[in-house]
Every structure is written in structure tokens, then in C-alpha cells.
Image (spheres, rainbow, N blue to C red):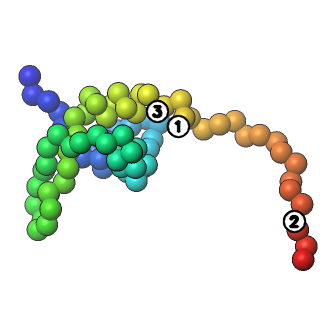
Amino acid sequence: MPVVQLTLQEACAVLDPPMSEPQLRIIIRALAIQPTGRRHNGQAGRPIDTFEAAELMRLHGALTPWLKPLPACRLPPRPIPVS
């Protein structure tokens, strides 16, 4: 069975709740997740890293509790220091 490969940009387009490409890239680097392939984008230069879609979805699922917007909290305004 073929494995679905996604670039980080493609993965971010389908993740819900959304996650930015820089956020996903930082997490992948911090966890030392290695790309599973490379794809040429039709332009000169380095090919784009691809990752197994299922692995990215599992990672996103584990992070989802921290991605949900938190309810607004009502804190009193902090005084502005005057110097």
C-alpha cells in the first residue's frame, strides 16, 4: 500500500485546528523527526522534504489540546509604570 507523503505546507493546509508551517517545522525539528522523502517543486534549488501524512496527523492529534484557543480571561489591567 502506498504511503501518502506531504510537505509541511500541504500538511498545514489540512490540519484542523490550524497550525502554521513555522510552528510545525519547529516541533518537527525539536522532536528530531526525519523526512521520509523529497519532492522536486519544478524550480531550481533543493527539493522539498516530505513526511508521512499519518505520522504528521498523529503528531497533530497529540498537540491538539494545546492548539485550541483558550477562553478569554478577565484580568485587571496592569498599571503603566511612569518614569
Query: Residue 63 placed where, x, y %?
Result: 46, 33
Q: Is residue 22 above or below residue 14?
A: below
Does the CB distance between marks 2 and 1 fall below 8 Å? no
State the residue at coordinates (11%, 68%).
44
Callout 2 amino acid? Ile
Q: Which residue is identified by label 3?
A: 63
**Inter-mark Cα distance, 3 to 1:** 7 Å
The residue sitting at 90% across, 77% down in the picture is 83
Residue where numbered disc 2 is placed:
80
Q: Is residue 6 shown to the viewer in this render? A: no
Above/below status of 54 relative to 35: above
Residue 74 seen anywhere in this rendered image of the structure: yes
Q: Say which label, 2 or 1, has the lower sequence index.
A: 1
Given the image, on which type of amino acid does mark 1 rest?
Leu
Three-letter amino acid code of the residue under disc 3: Leu
User: Residue 60 is drawn in which quadrant?
Assistant: top left
Residue 33 circle label: none
How far is the residue under mark 2 from the one under mark 1? 31 Å
Q: Secondary structure at mark 3?
A: helix
Report, in whole angstroms, how far the alpha carbon at label 3 lies from the one at label 2: 36 Å
Taking the spot 88% from the left edge, 48% from the top edge, the residue there is 76
Q: Sort mark 1 into few (<14), some (14-19) or many (20+) by Cα contacts within 10 Å.
A: some
Q: Which mark is residue 67?
A: 1
| Residue at 9% in and 28% down | 2
- Relative depth, front residue between 33 and 53: 33
